[in-house]
Image (cartoon, helix red, strand yellow):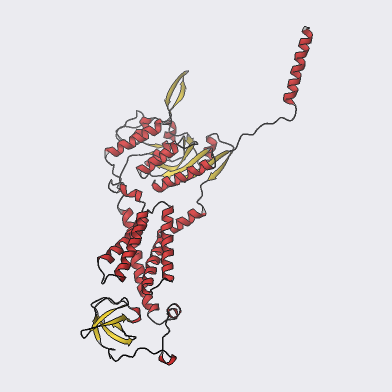
Amino acid sequence: MRRLLLFSLMLLGTTCFAATTDGPATTESPAVKKIYVFPLREQIMPSSVRLTDKCLRQAAEQQADYVVIDLNTYGGLLDAGDSIRTRILNAPMPVLIFVNNQAASAGALIALAADSIYMRDGASIGAATVVNQNGEALPDKYQSFMRGMMRATAEAHGKVAEVRDGDTTWRWHRDPHIAEAMVDPSVTIPGLIDSTKVLTFSADEAIRWGFAEGKVSSVEELLERAGITDYEITRYEPTAMDRLLGFLTNPAFQGILIMLIIGGIYFELQTPGLGVPSIVALTAALLYFAPLYLEGLAANWELFLFIVGVILILLEIFAIPGFGITGILGILAVVLGLAFAMIDTDLLKYIPTGELSAGIILQPVALVIIAVAGALLLSIWLGSRFLRGRSRLRERVVLTSGLHPEEGYISHTSSRHLVGQQGITRTALRPAGKVLIDGTLYEAAGENGLFIEPGRPITVVRDEGGTLYCRELS
């Protein structure tokens, strides 16, 4: 009985072994890691926050296992740096930072938020004191806020176990006290820095004090040092739409669009009716404002201000005699609408604190003023050269045919004998209005559609159809 039981157990074991080993052995290869890489290589501004948002969103959509940020910046705005820091801390995947030269000021805050930091040989990290555009330290309330953020960011990565002489101790992965020393020169770290300097780490120092995992010269070497060997990299590349938006928001091209807007409005006023100038102006306005909206720069009030300015100018020309406050307000509204559309309004709050200079406003305003002035001068020259002179272009774009008596067209015969008479304009001739000659008011118009301001001396060059066609006396 015992032998039978033993034989049965042996038979069962053999059967089970055969069942588990029957057929080809299959082993699953480790999954390829997806790496998403994007750069932060400019001053940290709201545009940097938008880029970080976009890239982290794309990385999540592609189910990336790691994100690598190629960082090289001397800093920027505190709020923008804090926003990027928060997004990195809350990212659904590990974020690795490659300090590809500099991570100063807000750049240091961004780097500390990453799960791992790798630095190029010769790179540095630190110097996070909050300063204004002149490099002068801002009041202590700003430094206190920055110290708190640096400390909290270092603490967010917790502590790691360290075994020394058989004893296990816990230390901060990145020492919050050292992080504060990057902001406050009064913080001392024995053996590292005294109380007179703001801390900046070289690559070797950052590694020695636990603020960096190693020195690398490329993203590929970073991944190797991080133990990631089987991977595929997706690098952020501007799309065709991004490149188009970049071209349309180039200041030089924006200046051309402004000139087309103003020139289109000017020529439309010269040639009543909705025609080519209106189409040009509307198309240029669309190409000007739409990219700024997509980039998050323009706001609704800026477009509204531009439209109100155009309406005020039209009212001044067609409804209100003379040129006064309405026209001035219209021009001012157009200039400000075009200028502020180019300005990231998130930056305006930094001007009173001294973190940014007023140049961020003056530069776009100057560009708009120059473009508007250039457009007006060029439009006046083109108008006098081609629309009122004699040229082949004028014959193609302007109706120049006349109604001659020999062709059967007979104008109203007048015996007023006013041709050659001189008078004064009582209203603006735009191009029609009234003139005063020898105490009598007459319907009149500017010769060849010329605009003549009220109170200007004129001479009558022809009298047709009950209208006196006049030219301003120089």
Between 260 and 77, which is closer to the camera in this rendering?
A: 260
Residue 270 horizontal/vertical position (percent): 36, 74
Could you tell me which residue is drawn at 43 percent across and 67 percent down?
280
Q: Looking at the picture, does residue 235 appear above or below residue 208?
A: below
Between 48 and 53, which is closer to the camera in this rendering?
A: 53
Residue 418 horizontal/vertical position (percent): 27, 89
Figure quadrant of residue 461: bottom left
* Residue 158 seen in render: yes
Residue lying farthest top? 1
Q: Looking at the picture, does residue 101 appear above or below residue 341?
A: above
Could you tell me which residue is drawn at 33 percent across and 57 percent down?
363
Residue 239 horizontal/vertical position (percent): 51, 52
Q: Looking at the picture, does residue 348 appear above or below residue 212?
A: below
Q: Is residue 291 left or right of residue 9?
A: left
Q: Is residue 439 left or right of residue 108?
A: left
Figure quadrant of residue 423: bottom left
Could you tell me which residue is drawn at 44 percent across and 64 percent down?
283
Quadrant that contains the N terminus: top right
Residue 97 horizontal/vertical position (percent): 46, 39
Figure quadrant of residue 109: top left
Quadrant that contains the C terminus: bottom left
Residue lying farthest left? 439
Image mark count? 0
Q: Is residue 375 left or right of residue 457?
A: right
* Residue 369 seen in render: no
